[in-house]
Image: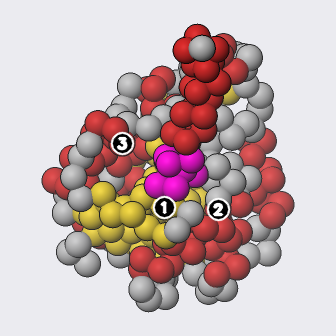
Amino acid sequence: MKSFIVPYVFPVFRFLERAAAYSQGKGYGACTVKQEVSAVFKQLGSRPKLAVDVGANIGRYSQELRIKQKDLEIHIFEPASVNLQKLRSTFFSDSLIIINQCGISNRSGNATLFSNYSGSVLGSLTKRRLDHFGVNFDYEEDVKLIRFEDYWKSTLNYRPVDVVKLDIEGHELDALNGFGCALAATKVIQFEFGGCNIDTKSYFQDFFYYFKDNGFDLSRITPFGLEFVNSYREIDEFFSTTNYLATNKNI
């Protein structure tokens, strides 16, 4: 009897595990742009003036920002050339959206963008191993990288930044390490964490202590609102797409 029941029990446990995680926002981060932007605006508590979209792909996040606020200035960063064409076509008449063909990192220079096809949402500066999904990651493109602090000083003239969105497939921490003094001038940062962090070997622990040490509160976007992450737990190393907000306590 025991051997008969066991094969049916584990699928139930796996379903409950996924449901419990999802309710906490773990794995909730796919196709949730509208909810992400709503969470950011709620956290800001006032009308933002300046937003930065790092890893814009074809611009869905910036489009949602524009729906929320018609006079918001948005600076877009996207390295893939095919996506740049789509971004320029989408926002050609919007003078408040500035499009930059480059990626954001902890250094300035050239790099290789790897993906499964040109313009893929999976594009990463790391050649990911996705054999388990049947995904070939052999497409390559030469791209340009800059440090955000340099852009903040030269183009944004040290202005306060209300919101930064980071979705750069496992290299979010690299980008943050290039913020320099701009970090203290940034109010809310939304970043994605998931399977790509396995390939880049960056962990939620790294993000937790980075933001704690720099005076930010962390919260996770869930189907039921924000769940504040007040302490680090190893169980939060959850490698399905999850979105977090980091809020500057000093602004």
Task: Classify 10 Å Cα crowding around label 2: few (below 14), some (14-19), many (20 and above).
Answer: some
Q: Position of residue 119 (x, y in %)?
A: 75, 38
Which residue position is annotated with label 1? 221
| Between discs 2 and 3, the one toward the N terminus | 2
Q: Name the amino acid type tagged 2.
A: Val
**Residue at point 48%, 35% (across, down):** 239
Query: How many numbered circles are shown?
Result: 3
Which quadrant: the C terminus? bottom left
| Between discs 2 and 1, the one toward the N terminus | 2
| Between discs 3 and 1, the one toward the N terminus | 1
Q: Position of residue 15 (x, y in %)?
A: 60, 38
Image marks 2 and 3: residues in contact by CB distance under 8 Å:
no
Q: Position of residue 105 (x, y in %)?
A: 42, 41
The residue positioned farthest toward the left in the image shown: 213
Q: Is residue 139 above or below residue 157?
A: above
Which residue position is annotated with label 2? 33
Q: Which mark is residue 236?
A: 3
Q: Position of residue 228 (x, y in %)?
A: 33, 63
Looking at the rendered image, the disc whose residue lies closer to the viewer, 2 or 1, is 1
How far is mark 3 from mark 1, CA to CA? Answer: 13 Å
Q: Nearer the viewer, residue 193 or 82?
A: 193
**Residue at point 65%, 35% (across, down):** 122
Looking at the rendered image, the disc whose residue lies closer to the viewer, 2 or 3, is 3
Q: Magenta stretch: give its range.
A: 19-28
Q: Is residue 83 visible to us here?
A: yes
Q: Based on the picture, tell me whether residue 22 belongs to the magenta stretch.
A: yes
Q: Nearer the viewer, residue 221 or 210?
A: 221
Q: Is residue 181 visible to us here?
A: no
